[in-house]
Image (cartoon, grey):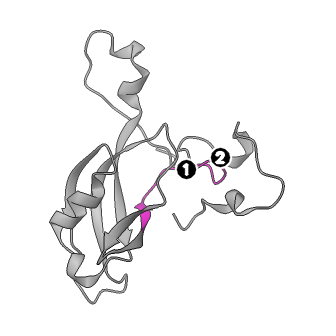
Amino acid sequence: MDNQVLVLNRWSEGVEDNYGAFTTAPLWVQMWNLPVHWLSKEVGRKIGAIFKEVKEVIVPQAGGKEGRHLKVLALVDLSKPLLRGTLVNVAESLKWVAFKYERCPDFCYSCGIVGHGERTCKEQRNSSGSLLEHQYGPWL
């Protein structure tokens, strides 16, 4: 709603006092920069293990305008910064797999946490102009 995420949970006694019950939400995550032979549901589940839980993996049809990637429906912890990617071991070398979120709710470009913007962020900004300031953006 209004580009925000609405987290619903089954009611149980005491759930209203359990903040942790409302910190995860399912989001579609695209995984980019994978070798062609890694485009499988099994690989999507293995890499997706970095999230709380993987609900579904889709291997988009090859030849589309988007390019080669996997789509994973994963439970994402909204109380922590969004993951920008992860390193995987490919043929004895490390390769960066970039994440992009589909229909992601508003999140802070300073700290990467869903639910607020840069103007209301409580994190201290790095005024020295280092790369830390631009780790998040609309590309995510």
Residue 122 location in percent, x, y? 71, 36
Q: Amino acid at mark 2?
A: Gly
Which quarter of the picture shows residue 67? Answer: bottom left
Secondary structure, mark 1, is loop
Residue 131 location in percent, x, y? 70, 63
Q: Main secondary structure of the magenta part?
A: loop
How crowded pointer 2 is (Cα within 10 Å; few <14, some 14-19, many 20+) is rated as some
Residue 103 location in percent, x, y? 43, 58
Residue 61 location in percent, x, y? 21, 81
Is residue 107 within the magenta segment?
yes
Q: Is the Cβ of the residue at disc 2 closer than 8 Å to that at disc 1?
A: yes
Q: Is residue 132 left or right of residue 24?
A: right
- The magenta stretch is 97-111
Query: How far apart in space, not on screen, are marks 2 and 1 (Cα)?
Result: 7 Å
Q: Is residue 121 left or right of residue 140?
A: right
The residue lying at 31 percent from left, 81 percent from top is: 68
Above or below 100: residue 5:
above
- Residue at the disc numbered 1: 106
How crowded pointer 1 is (Cα within 10 Å; few <14, some 14-19, many 20+) is rated as some
Secondary structure, mark 2, is loop
Q: Amino acid at mark 1?
A: Asp
Which quarter of the picture shows residue 47? Answer: bottom left
- Residue at the disc numbered 2: 117
Is residue 109 within the magenta segment?
yes
